[in-house]
Image (cartoon, rainbow, N blue to C red):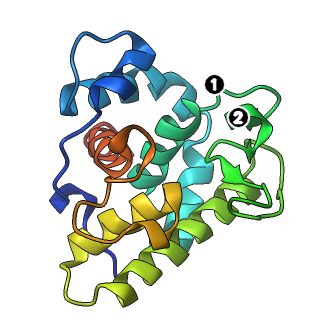
Amino acid sequence: MGYADIMDVEATGASRQTAQQDRLGYSGVRASETMAETDRGRMGRYKSKINRVGNDTGIDPALIAGIISRESRAGNALDGGWGDSGKAWGLMQVDITSTGGRHTRRGEWDSEEHIRQATGILVYFIQRISEKFPNWSREEQLKGGIAAYNMGDGNVTSKNVDERTTGGDYSNDVVARAQWYRRNGF
């Protein structure tokens, strides 16, 4: 399956709520880009793993980096690999709870195995959204899959894919960060 080019996906960027995590006095694409840039140095540690997984799965490495930046700030927001009050694991925050994703923890929190597992979950959601909304453009399906990665495909009910996502901006923020990473070496 071919996925849309992340650079062709429309994005409004981070909400004010998300931007407040870095105490930014602004929101939107500029805030997403600022947060991605803040994570750049840490992200470099994972670049070869991200590139291998991206090449193997057909997912743009910049998109994987965008999710890592949003979910764990390239590991900076984790405590021993755990985030979300111990409910999610690793750089890409795989939900291991019985009420959430019900996934099994794979690999170390910063391992290629973890990135591969999480990217597989992303691919699954992109495919689910593509099947659920076959008349959407490839860009809309990709964005819907990103939103579903955050809160499940059952919560994507319209083209306003972030209606129920964390911060009301998950896919818009991730896409804007991914676009920044693409322009800056991923």
* Mark 2 residue crowding within 10 angstroms, few (<14) / some (14–19) / many (20+): many
Q: Position of residue 78 (x, y in %)?
A: 70, 28
When the figure is inspected, residue 181 is found, relative to residue 35, above or below; the finding is below
Q: Which residue bears the numbered disc 2?
A: 83
Amino acid at dot 2: Gly
Residue 61 in view: yes
Q: Quadrant of residue 131?
A: bottom left
The one nearer the camera, 115 or 183, is: 115
When the figure is inspected, residue 105 is found, relative to residue 89, above or below; the finding is below
The one nearer the camera, 165 or 114, is: 165
Q: Earlier in the sequence, mark 1 or mark 2?
A: 1
Mark 2 and mark 1 in contact (Cβ < 8 Å)?
yes
**Element type where label 2 sits in the image:** strand
Disc 1 versus disc 2: distance between alpha carbons? 7 Å
Q: Which mark is residue 77?
A: 1
The one nearer the camera, 72 or 182, is: 72
Q: Position of residue 75 (x, y in %)?
A: 64, 30
Q: Position of residue 64 (x, y in %)?
A: 48, 52
The residue at the point 47 percent across, 25 percent down is 39
The one nearer the camera, 130 or 73, is: 130
* Mark 1 residue crowding within 10 angstroms, few (<14) / some (14–19) / many (20+): some
**Element type where label 1 sits in the image:** loop
The residue at the point 68 percent across, 36 percent down is 84
The residue at the point 27 percent across, 42 percent down is 176
